[in-house]
Image (cartoon, helix red, strand yellow):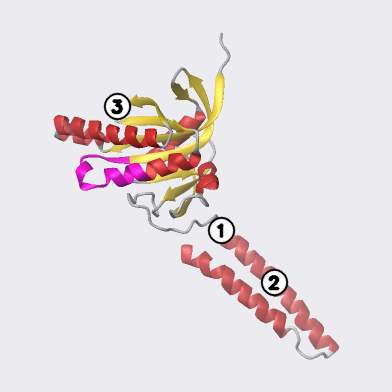
Amino acid sequence: MSQVQRKLTTILAADAAGYSGSMEANEVRTLEALRASRTVFQQFITRHHGRIANTAGDGLIAEFPSVVEAVQCAIEVQRELGTEVHSGLRFRIGVHLGDVIVDGDDLLGEGVNLAARLQSMAEPGGILISQQVYDQVQKKLSVGFAYLGEKTPKNFSESVAVYSVGGAEGGAGKARAVRAAPPSEGKAQFFARAGRLGLILAALFAIDWMTGEEWWVQWPAIGMALWLAFRSGPLFERS
């Protein structure tokens, strides 16, 4: 048995949203739209130095040697497919950087599966990327990213950090600036930290009272209050 060949690569997974319903409504028009969309994918994938590894039905898997080129390709494809010229089908795209198994021209393995799961979680016209991809592109592309939290893809035992490209749910065909927000501390942790600060302040007040010193503790108290206000603002806005 030949040795399994593996490599690290960037995988782009895409499929058409609502394809079965479109086929049921009008087979000929849907097939024409699918062919036109595949031509767009092929054009931009080639432009960004990628290749299509396999196609199945309304979907495709492509790989890129560059993470930046893969995400840029996804953005440009969605922009093009969002124009009036291509109004037939809307695609969801997922991008992941991971280890894959090479089988001829085909790619297999968990890396491909995760890209496909990200694609399935995206909104029509949207792009979702993994943490590995975000780490590589967030300072290299002039497009916004939104942190969507830890999600557990279907048939995966562990959760993964997911980011959308250009929209709160990865549904914007045209990228817009959205600040990426890393996971924040939970409310329980926040209140626990606030309680410890309260005990420290109580101890300082007691020392002031027993020593008869002037109330110098008011200054650290003000500083702690400002710090708590700063930390609590984003926390409760997101809840």
Q: Does residue 198 appear anywhere in the picture?
A: yes
Residue in the picture at 54% in, 42% down: 132
State the residue position of label 2.
Answer: 197
For marks 1 and 2, the one nearer the N-term is 1
Residue 81: say if magenta.
Answer: yes
The magenta-colored residue range is: 76-91
Residue 233: say if magenta.
Answer: no
State the residue position of label 3.
Answer: 57
Mark 2 to mark 3 CA distance (whole Å): 59 Å
For marks 1 and 3, the one nearer the N-term is 3
For marks 2 and 3, the one nearer the N-term is 3
Badge 2 local density, few (<14 within 10 Å), some, or many (20+)? some
Drawn side of residue 202 relative to residue 113, left or right: right
Amino acid residing under circle 3: Gly
State the residue position of label 1.
Answer: 184
Drawn side of residue 120 relative to residue 3, left or right: left
Question: Considering the numbered disc 1 on the image, is that residue within a helix, a strand or a loop?
Answer: loop
User: Which of labels 2 and 3 is toward the front?
Assistant: 3
